[in-house]
Amino acid sequence: MATTITKTETLVGKRIRRQEDPRLITGTATYVDDIKMPGMHHACILRSPHGAAKIRSIDIKPAQDLPGVAAVFTGKDVEGVGPVPCGASLPGLRVPPHAILAKDRVYFIGHPVAVVVATDRYIAADALDLIEVDYEPLPTVTDPEKALAAGAPAVHPEWPDNTAFLYHQEGGDPETAFKEAEVVVKQRITSQRLIPTAMETRGVVAEYRSAEKSLTLYSSTQIPHLLRTLVSQMLGLAENHLRVITPEVGGGFGSKLNVYAEEALMGFVAMKIGKPVKWIESRRENFQCTIHGRGHVDYYEVAAKRDGTVLGLRLKLIQDLGAYHQLLTPAIPTLSVLMMPGLYKFRNVTADIVGVFTNCVPTDAYRGAGRPEATHGIERMMDLLAAELKMDPAELRLKNFIGKDEFPYATATGLSYDSGNYAEPLKKALDLVDYHKLRQEQKQAKASGRLLGVGISTYGEICAFGPSPATPAGGWESATVKIEPSGKVTVMTGASPHGQGEETTFAQIAADELGVPIDDVIVVHGDTAVVQYGIGTFGSRGTAVGGPAVYYALQELKKKIRKFGEMLLETTDVTVSGGQCVDNRTGKSVSLAQIAGASYRAMKLPPNTEPGMVATYFWEPPNFAFPFGAHIVVSEVDRETGHVEIKRYVAVDDCGNIINPLLVDGQVHGGVVQGLGQALYEQAVYDDDGQLITGELMDYAIPKASMVPWIESSHTITPSPVNPLGVKGVGEAGTIGCSPAVVNSVVDALSHLGVKHIDMPMTPEKLWNLVHQGGQA
Amino acid sequence: MRPETPGMASRRPSRHLIFNAFCHNIIDRQKADSMKRKINLTINGKSFTDEVEPRMLLIHYLREVAGFTGPHIGCETSICGACTVALDGKAVKSCTMFAVQADGREVTTIEGLATNGQLHPVQEAFWNEHALQCGFCTPGMIMTSKQLLERNPHPTEEEIRHGIEGNLCRCTGYQHIVNAVKAAAAKAGA
């Protein structure tokens, strides 16, 4: 028998550097803007400079006449294209028609009005200047609470109350809980609008082949297959005539979990002009027109006993939706409600959401999508309750955690938490910071006038979206695993990683299951003509839902490998290991290459077995997974400048089993820093006229390397029973856990001044005023 | 009626300042063509000669004319650093320079770092330390890190964080990048 390289070491659980990196560190990866095609044209989009206005007229003639301009299209040209889809449904939801180009009215700064197509991007940009639009500016409203006030300008004239929907959810008996409470704490808590800011802006290349009536869209998206289904509907194109390719995608964080006007618009343009067309979003467009995240004003009330036992939770949630619904806009705050009890035994909860239209770009899923808001709310409220009861915030949390023997745990919001041991990461984090000693040091520091604070956040999150009944487009994921005739392994995943590293983690899983070297495996994704239908990468689901699909496809394949192995070895008792099929009695073996070769040549087949060595599996998860953890922040506020120094950041995360600890660390660090951005630096600011003041990276402060602390990351491991890998998902954990820990630490630093709550971002100006005006901002 | 906010509510919200300034009024194509300048520069050791409009940004020249798509465009306002290349050995943001300003000079892009298939130590360190996720900022981040180590072969964590401040990364939280720069420094010192 042939000798093959036998792999004995398992890869799952090891810190393995990534398979995708060689192309990325050498500058040879292909992002959308790197695509060049013969005859390719460039598109630039004219956008509204007004937050709200009527369009009286548009004169495109001078732009059309500019040499090099192939076409100019406006709203009336694209009337045949379907609306930008909203995939979420709620009872009574008002859905404004969302055309891909504005026709007679614009609703937010950056609203697309016309598209110019030219032979190069400089000419297209020149031509934009030549379009004359006569606008009649209208009053705008950009603050969701102001939008709800009587007499506020109507974003959509047909709905003068600016209310898109009302949503109520209740569990247990909140009324009695609040009646019987010995203490009630209340707080208004905001989660400001944030701009996701993937380093690669969006971009689309569209190529139409008229003879075949086939359109190819290269788009920087997290959801190639869903995009294909929805854009084909918008364009009236047969779905199997539309191919979506996601080349390298430079980050998404939820902002590319969407179907955007420009994706259909470029398809429309390519079909009209018969040439390939490229549109690359500028950073300013990215800030104005790609979805924002958060945008909550929350009114919380917690009912408790004097001994700290929590009884009830009440939430009024005002969600700033922006002017339209994008793909999931109205669904995002419902996730906040689901997770509002956090890790605690709140048996009585009630929540009311008001979804509010404003003259702003729509909000939608941004890293955490509804869960950072919920965690921020409950974790601030636990600290407020602890302060009210003069209890230690760690003690209050430990007292109210769901016990480790209470899983699966049915929450008052209707979820079933899969597994958990919530005290363990908190205790570990408390040990890591040496909590009791730290509190002593803090006492001394405060006595000497220093503003030192300690903040705790114990977060839980819902992820691994998710069972299909709870996920608008299906919550499963797919995988195909092929062994090529040479024995090399190809994994095709319906997930669409864009930085998470699943080309490596899925290769680790496949290499272990088949016993082949990792370099014999490649992972293919993001091309609807190549990969079977899939859902995509978002909601910390890539590994937690995509991974099991790969695992089960491998199990199917191994059945077939065994059949061919038994046939070739003329036995009935074999094991697949080390890249071979081994006869358990004689020790004789055949390699995977020999087996795969035999399966394709098919000179002889095992009984009831078809040729080839391919297996596809669509895996439907029975439940969500619920990661959790504890973050502790030690911070100090500079009395003179109001600047916050994070002195220690300890993160203990439990994301279930870990496939690649190196990659998990990366996810935690990146997540934490995005949470830190929200806590300290970032805010999308619109003025009253609807102008986006933070319209560029010059004005919108995403954290730089010098603005973030060293993160001490460690883990506890509580496997999820939901999937065979025991993984829970980690993409959003850092962001969810971070912001309340930071805010709690700063509030703690200023508590002796009477400070009970600070809204984000905690800018130096805000803190300086608190310090120098006796706790009043 | 509301007044337009000066500088904010431009009729061209999609464009950045420099690009705007130089696109403006250059709408006569023949005039634009006649204004083209001949430039001669070296990119990654190879000589390039082209005629370009004076307004063409260096990053557009590198990516679209010379075909080096390693440097990326992330902000067009010289904040993010994804477009960082070396010009005569010094790290510059190629979105904030014109191609004509590179005339007669030597440019190194990320594509020029590896020699004979051998990764540059900074590239190797980025790979080993998982200093990248989506990879979009990475070419610029590596060029800047390389420059940082040339100036300061043994930087402290604080010096590294300060040194890469002109390059934004939204994925990694920077910690593994700091580790990578340290690792590259240690290897060079070994």
Image (cartoon, coloured by chain):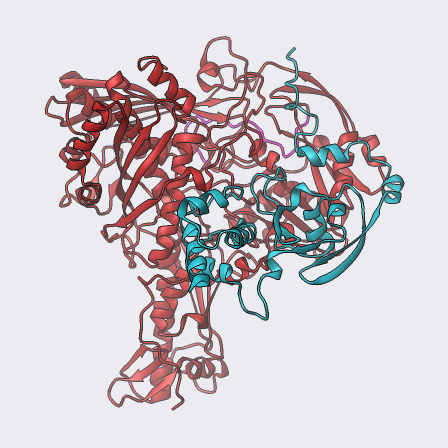
Chain colours: A red, B cyan
Q: On the rendered structure, is A671 left or right of A312?
A: right
Q: Is residue A224 above or below residue A757?
A: below
Q: Name the residue furthest top.
A: A151
Q: What is the span of residues highlighted in magenta in the rendered image?
A: A88-103
What is the x, y in percent for residue A751? 25, 21
Image quadrant assignment for residue A129: top right
In the image, is B123 to the left or to the right of B176? right
Magenta span dominant secondary structure: loop
Q: Is residue A89 magenta?
A: yes
Instruction: Report x, y in % for residue A207.
Output: 69, 52
Q: Is residue A619 above or below residue A564?
A: above
Q: Position of residue A677 (x, y in %)?
A: 42, 35
The front one of A443 and A739 is A443
Left-right relation of B84 to A163: right
Work out whether residue A412 or residue A36 is closer to the camera in this orientation and state it.
A36
Q: Is residue A133 above or below residue B78?
A: above
